[in-house]
Image (tube, rainbow, N blue to C red):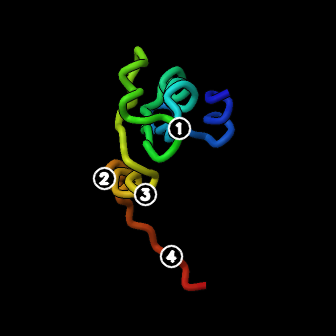
Amino acid sequence: MMRTALNRIGAHSETSIMIGDRMDTDVKSGLEAGMRSVLVLSGSTREEEIALYPYRPTVVLDGIADVVPLVGRLTPIESVELDED
């Protein structure tokens, strides 16, 4: 399913990140698709539960708002001219 979604939007697993709040679905499916993963602790999985799984997310953050600065650091800045229309 993840590979189909990536293909549909023209993305690649090497340059995509799965963000979710569940270790058993979100993080696992992202890793199985070859993506890096971000676990946000504002949902289902608590920090102490991470050790119960044989796999780990790439990054663990408190909430989705903490993803914004991470994206800014990982995304190359490109100069784009905007039309004044």
Q: What amino acid is found at the position of numbered circle 3 in the picture?
A: Ala
Foreground mark, 2 or 1, reads 1
- The correct choice, above or below, for 84 with respect to 63 in the image is below
Q: Which residue is mark 1?
A: 44
Q: Which is nearer the N-term, disc 4 or disc 1?
A: 1
Amino acid of disc 4 = Leu
* Front of the two marks 4 and 2: 2
Labels 1 & 3 near each other (Cβ < 8 A): no
- At horizontal 39% and vertical 26% (from top left) the residue drawn is 50
Residue that extends furthest to the bottom in the rendered view of this protein: 84
Marked residue nearer the N-terminal end (4 or 3): 3
Figure check: 10 above or below 32: below
Q: Amino acid at mark 2?
A: Arg
Residue 5 percent coordinates (x, y): 66, 35
Between residue 62 and residue 35, name the one nearer to us.
Answer: 62
Q: Earlier in the sequence, mark 4 or mark 2?
A: 2
The alpha-carbon separation of the residues under discs 1 and 3 comes to 16 Å
Checking the image for residue 65, the label placed there is 3
CA–CA distance in space, label 4 to label 1: 41 Å
Sequence-wise, which precedes: disc 1 or disc 3?
1
Identify the mark at residue 73; answer none if there is no mark.
Answer: 2
Residue 40 image offset from top left, x and y in percent: 44, 43
Q: Residue at x 52, y 43 (%)?
A: 43
For the residue labelled by badge 2, is the local secondary structure a helix, a strand or a loop? Answer: helix
Residue pictured at 52% horizontal, 24% vertical: 28
Q: Measure the alpha-carbon separation of dots 4 and 3.
A: 27 Å
Q: Quadrant of the C terminus?
A: bottom right
What residue sits 53% from the left and 38% below the top? 44
First along the sequence among labels 2 and 3: 3
